[in-house]
Image (cartoon, grey):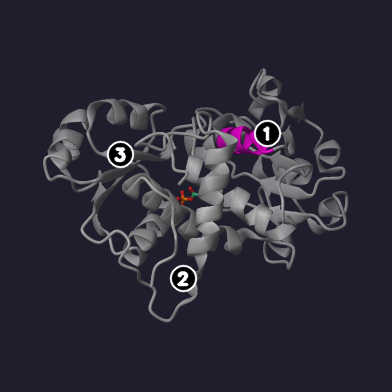
Amino acid sequence: MPTLQSKDLLGIETLSPDEITLILDTAEAMRSIGERQIKKVPALRGRMVVNLFFEASTRTRFSFETAEKWLSADSLNFAAKGSSVEKGESLLDTARNLQAMAPDLIVIRHGTPGVPHFLARHLRAGVVNAGDGAHEHPTQALLDAMTIRRHFGRLEGLRVAIVGDLAHSRVVRSNIWLLTKMGARVVVCAPPTLLPPRIDEMGVEATTDFDEALAEADVVMMLRMQLERQGSSLFPSAREYFKRYGLTAAKLARASPDAVVMHPGPMNRGVEISSEVADSPRSLILEQVSNGVAVRMAVLYLLLTGHGWEGEA
Ligand code: CP
């Protein structure tokens, strides 16, 4: 039976197309657990998962917790605030002390790129990257792919425009790895100050022209302006940014007539996206959140059992 090659999920860059397909197919099969009256199966009973969050999160943290609960795993939730990190305990000491309580898997979000990889080298437990700085956010890309695949029935051949603060985005990097591996055409778009140099070397088209990015796009994925990660102002004002790069209904009309809108959240309404688009029938934004639970169930199950899902009562 197919499974994942590693004890960890650290990024999309190292996954094969077969592994990506396995996770998406498993998530599709597990999605129905959330549609039952009793949303619980015993699949991971007796397994312990530590959710270690050093950065703020709503969607990722709660969907991992939901996935763990629906699969009957035990969850330990760690937030840096209120822990001994505030007394100066190092990351590795924190992780080693948690390891001493014998968790099977650690889900970590951290502001520094590479922290999940560092922990994976030092801990027996599996490690899942829930976002490391501006590096990768693999489960976000997987839930985005699941959402696109559910809507269009495929990823191959679709044109996906990813627009916004690319310089500070881990979502864009994971999505580029995933979508290009799966045969989608990706165009990325940002103002010159937020467009990483040589991003086109990742196999994507890069432009500063929003209209050019939107032309014939099947999916328009808007990214959050990450003001908290910007040292100095990289654009004149939120109002000016919205005028040039904000997604309105008029702008969306430039994309393919059947184009859908996505956003990983949290949204800055009136900065990168208008409410009329975010709340429109063409928006898949809340569907992304629901699919996030299914994808995280699939990742937890595949990593912790070492085999595929055959369905469970
Ligand atoms: N998309 C995402 O990672 O959202 P959170 O920061 O709320 O987890």
Coordinates of residue 84 in the picture (x, y in percent): 14, 40
Amino acid on which disc 2 is placed: Gly
Q: Earlier in the sequence, mark 3 or mark 1?
A: 3
Against 149, residue 97 (above or below) is: above
The residue that disc 2 covers is: 34
Range of the magenta residues? 173-182
Residue 235 appears in view: yes
Q: Is residue 168 left or right of residue 121?
A: right
Question: Does the magenta portion include 181?
Answer: yes
Q: Is residue 107 left or right of residue 31?
A: left
Q: Position of residue 111 (x, y in %)?
A: 39, 34
Is residue 38 placed above or below 211 in the rendered structure?
Answer: below
Callout 2: few (<14), some (14-19), or many (20+) C-alpha neighbours within 10 Å? some
Secondary structure under badge 3?
A: strand
Main secondary structure along the magenta-highlighted residues: helix
Q: Which mark is residue 126?
A: 3
Q: CA distance from mark 2 to mark 3?
A: 25 Å
Are the residues tagged 1 and 2 within 8 Å (C-beta)? Answer: no
Tell me which residue sits at (66%, 19%) in the image: 197
